[in-house]
Amino acid sequence: GAGVSQTPSNKVTEKGKYVELRCDPISGHTALYWYRQSLGQGPEFLIYFQGTGAADDSGLPNDRFFAVRPEGSVSTLKIQRTERGDSAVYLCASSSGGRGSSGANVLTFGAGSRLTVL
Amino acid sequence: RKEVEQDPGPFNVPEGATVAFNCTYSNSASQSFFWYRQDCRKEPKLLMSVYSSGNEDGRFTAQLNRASQYISLLIRDSKLSDSATYLCVVNPSYNTDKLIFGTGTRLQVFP
């Protein structure tokens, strides 16, 4: 597609429920990133994929968070047993470059998925 | 110490003013550096990359000081439309492409 698409744009759920957030990156972009952003803070790194594999998942806060990208395109961020502290905007970004390429590290973000846990 | 630190501001400046932001990073092995701009309730967008030799794009100038581990952004002749949050972004290591964002510096340009 023309840009990074994220769905849903808004999700309200109850504490303890399971949530999936989807990201459709720019066509052909090999790298895909997930961040979350709380009010007044910068985006907090969660995980990034190079192709189908998670190249760095060091930002996932705990084992309730998991992300997949099975075909190297669309990615899903999965949150189990949601807690009120998980409320944030979850941002997805994609990048055209692999390591060392001119497009590496230049991110195009989606509009985000706003998650509210009641 | 945070990996990337910025003064959150806000910086309130009149139109036409020159304003500068600094950002410090903790890992001396950091590889690449960027400034992103984020408007209220919008996603971040790349403003410019920061090169070792410094770079300029119109009214915007970015500098990197590896010895002191900081990057800077200078905005000349500020416009009302420059009002936004400016995010400093660093790739902290040669063996990962993860990017670490600072908390952002808020700029408000007034008439």
Image: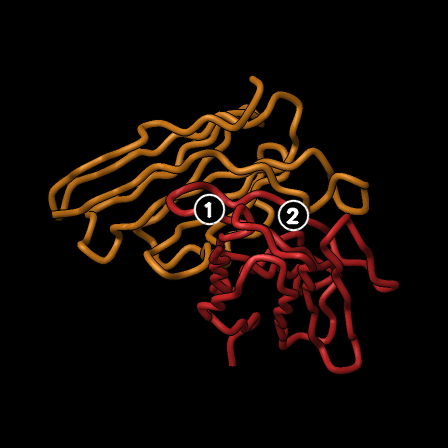
Chain colours: A orange, B red
- Would you say the residues marked 2 and 1 are in contact, meaning their CB atoms lie under 8 Å apart? no
Mark 2: which amino acid?
Leu
Q: Which element type, helix, strand or loop, lies under badge 1?
A: loop
Q: Position of residue B79 (x, y in %)?
A: 58, 51
Identified at 59% across, 25% down, the residue is A26
Toward the top, the furthest residue is: A1
Q: Is residue B69 above or below residue A10?
A: below
Viewer-side residue, B56 vs A52? B56
| Residue sitting at x 81%, y 41% | A102
Q: Residue at x 50, y 53 (%)?
A: B83
Chain containing mark 2: B
Residue B55 place in picture, x, y as percent: 82, 56
Q: Earlier in the sequence, mark 2 or mark 1?
A: 1
| Subunit bearing disc 1 | B
Dot 2 surroundings within 10 Å: few (below 14), some, or many (20 or more)? some
Which labelled disc corresponds to residue B39? 1
Q: Quadrant of residue A2?
A: top right
Find disc 2 in the rendering and name its residue: B47
Q: Is residue A97 left or right of residue A94?
A: right
Vertical side of A108 occupied by A47: above or below: below
- Taking the spot 57% from the left edge, 43% from the top edge, the residue there is B45
Q: Nearer the viewer, residue B42 or B95?
A: B42
Left/right of residue A9 with respect to residue B93 in the rendered view: left
**Amino acid under disc 1:** Asp
A91 and B93: which one is in front? A91
Figure check: A12 above or below B56: above
